[in-house]
Image (tube, rainbow, N blue to C red):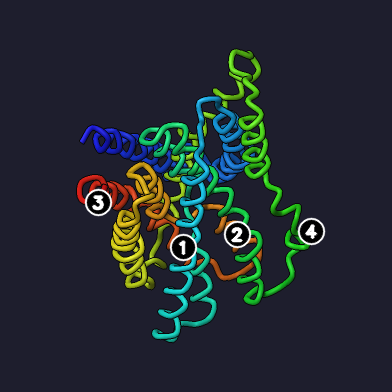
Amino acid sequence: MELFDILLRQISVFLILMAVGFAARITNLVPKDVFTALAMVIVNLLQPLFMLTMLSSPDIRIGFTELLSLLLAFLAHYLLTLTAIGLLGKARKWEPLFTDLNKSLLTSASAGFMGVPLAVSLLGVVGTFYIALFASIDILIQWTYKVNLMRRHQQQTVQSLEIPRWKRILTPQLVSVAAGILIGVLRIDFSGSILWDTLKEVGTMMKLTGMIYVGSTLVDINRESIKYIKSFIFIVVVRMVLYPIAFCYLLSLLPWFTPFMIMTIAILISLPPMVSLLVMIRNMQIEETYSAQCMLVTTAISLFTIPAVLWVVMNWIV
């Protein structure tokens, strides 16, 4: 139960930080434009610095079998979710846009804003490495498969999407992950350097500022979400609770998946959708009401569903 106590403590920190962001935004103590700028700082500066300094840690020891098993589990998660949403969309006769939005939203994870802080507290540097690796794969899929999935619903050509694909994929996060892994593989130890230690301290600010920003976005939950209440209930109950538990149970039947690996996957597939996905949808000028409200509602509720899922996984599965 010690691990679960750590989890509850981290979730409590999330709640406090989100409450700070929410209060600052709703009272207009900090305008929305400032929070928008803060998001850019987090995504383009703090997250990359955190990943770079963390992934290059000499303490990380990665087993090939473990890495391959986790990558295959991530792939299975993607394929299962995409297939299930496609079949459900046909059975319920959803509009193509609604089906594709759910495919994009429900296969992504807020690994940077929520997954990494949880992994740091619960799983240490190796677990954080896997979360960061998954976040990088998620970004890669977003700017390849998901862009093409959404492009057929695009209302008009947007200049930002005319940038060559390789430039869109080559985000600061991916560059920092690649550089961090390379430094780690070469066993270059920068610890003790004033510059490196300063960059590391700056990167750790992401864990605090990220949740403050997420809290500020909850002000945007509005009456529009009521239209999708049935969909949100389904997403919360099935996609965010029952599915992660069932998926982790199936993995526990395979002897090469250790409790540590299952815990890593449980965190990943319990997370709400990633924030940058909404930015992509907005840039493509696709109707964003459902996506925005889904992201906000699931993020708020995830503070309760993630502990529930991990409690079941810790006590009944691993």
Q: Which label number is shown at residue 51?
A: none
In this view, 236 is above or below 15: below
The residue under label 2 is which amino acid type?
Gln
Q: Position of residue 129 (x, y in %)?
A: 51, 38
Rendered view: 97 above or below 273: below
Q: Which residue is mark 2?
A: 142
Question: Residue 164's mark?
Answer: 4
Alpha carbon distance from label 3 to label 2: 31 Å
Q: Secondary structure at mark 3?
A: helix
Residue 117 pos. (x, y %): 43, 37
First reached walking from the N terminus: tag 1 or tag 2: 1
Nearest to the eye among marks 3 and 2: give it: 3
Q: Residue 317, which numbered label?
A: 3
SS class, disc 4: loop
Which residue position holds label 1? 76
In this rendered view, identify the residue nearer to me: 281 or 193. Answer: 193
Is residue 213 found left or right of 56 in the rendered image?
Answer: left
- In the rendered view of the protein, which quadrant contains the N terminus? top left
Q: Amino acid at mark 1?
A: Ala
In the visual, does 13 lie left or right of 100? left
Sequence-wise, which precedes: disc 2 or disc 4?
Answer: 2
Q: CA distance from mark 4 to mark 3?
A: 45 Å
In the structure shown, which secondary structural element does the residue marked by tag 1 occupy?
helix
* Residue at the (38%, 71%) spot, across then down: 228
Q: Nearer the viewer, mark 4 or mark 3?
A: 3
